[in-house]
Amino acid sequence: MSQIYNFSSGPAVLPREVLQTVQAELTDWHGSGMCVMEMSHRGKEFTQIIHEAEADLRKLLNVPANYRVLFLQGGAHFNFGMVPLNLSKEGDTADYVDTGHWSRIAIKEARRYANVNVVTSNEDRGSTYVPDEASWKRSANAAYLHYCSNETIGGVEFPFVPASTFEGKDIPLVCDMSSNILSRPLDIAKFGVIYAGAQKNIGPSGLTLAIVREDLLGHARPGTPTMLDYQVHAAADSLYNTPPTFGIYVAGLVFKWLLANGGVAAMEARNIEKAALLYETISASNDFYRCPVEKAFRSRMNVPFFLHDDALNEAFLEGAQARGLLQLKGHRAVGGMRASIYNAMPFEGVKTLAEYMREFARSH
Ligand SMILES: *Cc1c(COP(=O)(O)O)cnc(C)c1O
């Protein structure tokens, strides 16, 4: 097959070199005679795989010693429930920032367990920006503050990290980083809990990453299902039950690929360049294409855009497909197009898309 570029929002593109390593090692991992899928999760081979994956992730994100790295399942969705169950008691208030689709799903789930105070919402301007932090209505007694650092569907990304103190009190900051973790350097020490489904910027679906500050472990509410208690997974080094072994293996290869390619600082530089090219192509199109997101909050990972005439959508997607530019259709809730350009999307892919967009605009 000729060169293709996959712009899926997730499960999403993986580094080609990683897939080639997986292929080469598939039936015989490092002379073991076994595929990683066939190994005991408690055997020495897999023990090495999971330890290296954790060590490499810690190196990439500079994870401080008082944080635990957890390899979980259940996706970001399980964490929507785990956060209130582990970080708040019955009757507690939890603060939530609403910047779009994924914030709202997290809020809906949290309402089953906590008094949710929505500190701000961007719905007034079509969910296209992050409201100024000074205007947020935080509660003094919040068990934590939750936000989504990159709204994958709306294409709204935080250009800042919210304050982890309010009125002099430390408030654990909880972040759904599913679609922009590892895309830029991060000061983990500002956070209480970070979680991310793997299928955007880490590896295969089925694996979920959580980074949890140690003092927040061990406080799950009575009645919390065992598998939803962060402490259970921390105490068992992510091996309480059978973990998603193959996903952890592939994620570990992605971490090695990131380290070999300059780490998250180098990724950030590349991601800025890729996103700039797409947004410039959109704004230079004389309104042929339009991105609804306000400039300061445009995501480096997910670029939503609309054609000036919806009737051209099918032709645009067909032409893209014919050039090997795949999965550009926007989320069903939003319509239009969306180009997801995670770490594993090469600059060349974005360049090819930008050229196609200019050509399509000229000919239509
Ligand atoms: C994809 C995504 C989710 C949902 O993830 P699952 O792993 O399917 O539960 C949640 N939040 C964000 C920001 C996402 O991008």
Image (cartoon, grey):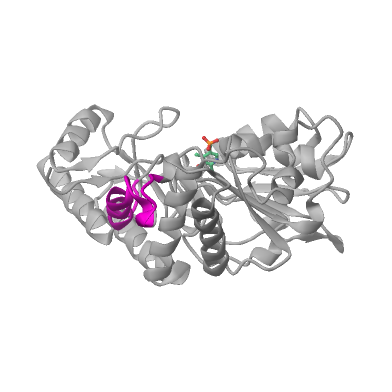
Q: Nearer the viewer, residue 176 or 290?
A: 176
Q: Would residue 26 be counted in the magenta stretch? A: yes
Residue placed at 42% from the left, 52% from the top? 301
**Count of marks overlaid on the render:** 0
The residue located at (52%, 40%) in the rendering is 244
Percent position of residue 193, x then y: 69, 52
Position of residue 160 measured from the top left corner of the image (x, y, whole percent) = 60, 62
- Seen at 44% across and 46% down, the residue is 200
Residue 341 located left or right of residue 164 = left
For residue 123, say whether it is visible: no
Quarter of the picture holding the C terminus: top left
Q: Nearer the viewer, residue 338 or 247?
A: 247
Relative placement, left or right, of 353 versus 261 is left
Question: Residue 85 in the image: x percent, y percent?
Answer: 78, 37
One can see residue 47 in this view: yes
Q: Is residue 31 magenta?
A: yes
Q: Which x, y percent locates residue 328?
A: 30, 39
Q: Residue at image x 45%, y 50%?
A: 249
Left or right: 127, with 238 as reference point: left
Classify the position of the N terminus by image quarter: top left
Quadrant for residue 259, please give it.
Answer: bottom left
Task: Give the magenta range.
Answer: 13-35
